[in-house]
Image: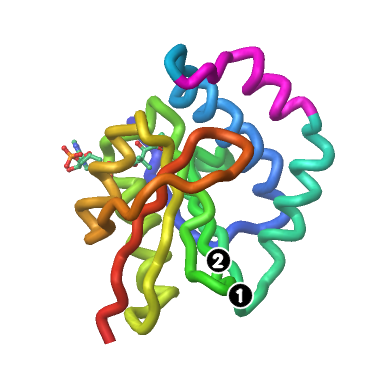
Amino acid sequence: MKKPIEIYPAKIKDTIGIFLVQRTVWLATYPNKEFGVTRNWIKAHFSDKKKRVARWRKGVRESKDSCVWVAKEGKRVVGFCEALKMKKHRIGTIYILPKYQHRGIGQALMTQALNWFGKQRNIYVGVAPYNTKAINFYKKFGFKIKGPVETGQLPEIEMVRKARP
Ligand SMILES: CC(C)(COP(=O)(O)OP(=O)(O)OC[C@H]1O[C@@H](n2cnc3c(N)ncnc32)[C@H](O)[C@@H]1OP(=O)(O)O)[C@@H](O)C(=O)NCCC(=O)NCCS
C-alpha cells in the first residue's frame, strides 16, 4: 500500500533529501541538445554537494522572507517548493521526483506557496523555455509568460502571476 504524502515546512534534517530531489529532477528534466544542456554539465553543476546542502540549511531556517515546503513519503523527501519574498516575490524552485509526478503533489505545494505570498504583489517564476510541462503547470495557477531572462545557468523565461489586491 502507498504511504500517504505529507507536506510541511522543511526542517534541517530534510536538506540532503532536498538536494537529492533537485539533482535527480534536473537530470530527468533539463538535458537538451538544442540548448546545449548535457547530463555531464548537470552532474558537474551538482558536484559541490556540501555547499549546496549548506545553502539549503540556510534556506530552511525560519524566516519571514522565505519558506521551503517538502512533500514526504515516510522519511523520504519526494518533492519540495521554495518561495522567496525578495525585491520580487518569486517561486525559487518546485521539483517533484519523476515517479511522484501527476499525483497532485505539485499542486499541493504550489497552493501552500501562493497562500503564503498572498495576493498583494506580483509573483514571478523562471522556467526553461523547453519545459512545456512546467509552463503549462504554472499557467493553471494564472502565470503568464513575460519573456526571456539572463541567468548564466539554464536558459530561462520568466512568468508572472499578477497581483490581485
Ligand atoms: C511541474 C511539476 C512541479 C508539477 O508537479 P506535479 O506533482 O507533477 O503536478 P500535479 O500532479 O499537481 O499536476 C500535474 C498533472 O497531474 C494531474 N493530477 C493531479 N493529481 C492526479 C492524480 N491523483 N491522478 C492523476 N493525475 C493527477 C493534474 O490534473 C495535472 O494534469 P494536467 O497537467 O493534465 O492538468 C513536476 O512535474 C516537476 O517537478 N517537473 C519537473 C521539474 C520542473 O519542471 N519543475 C519546475 C521548474 S521551473
The quadrant the C terminus occupies is bottom left
- In the rendered image, residue 114, in percent from the top left (x then y), is placed at 36, 68
Would residue 116 be found to the left or right of residue 69 on screen? left
Q: Quadrant of the N terminus?
A: top left
Q: Could you tell me which residue is drawn at 67 percent across and 60 percent down?
A: 60
The residue singled out by tag 2 in the image is 84
Q: Residues within 10 Å of mark 1 (few under 14, many from 20)?
A: few
Check if residue 111 falls in the magenta segment: no
Residue type of the residue flagged with mark 2: Leu
| Residue range highlighted in magenta | 35-47
Q: Position of residue 134 (x, y in %)?
A: 33, 40
Name the amino acid type tagged 1.
Asp
Q: Secondary structure at mark 2?
A: strand
Q: Is residue 46 magenta?
A: yes
Q: Nearer the viewer, residue 4 or 79?
A: 79
Q: How many marks?
A: 2
* Residue carrying label 1: 65
State which image quarter holds ligand 1: top left
Q: Earlier in the sequence, mark 1 or mark 2?
A: 1
- Quadrant assignment, res 113: bottom left
Q: Please, what secondary structure does the residue beneath circle 1 have? A: loop
Q: Give the label on residue 48, or none.
A: none
Q: Residue furthest bottom?
A: 165
Q: Residues within 10 Å of mark 2 (few under 14, many from 20)?
A: many
What whole-number distance in Å separates the C-alpha atoms at marks 1 and 2? Answer: 6 Å
Q: Are the two marked residues, 1 and 2, in contact with CB atoms closer than 8 angstroms?
A: yes
Q: Check the image and report above or below for 112 versus 115.
A: above
Going by the image, does 64 lie left or right of 121?
right
Q: Which residue occupies the foreground of this view, 87 or 92?
A: 87
Tell me where residue 161 appears, x and y as whole percent. 31, 65
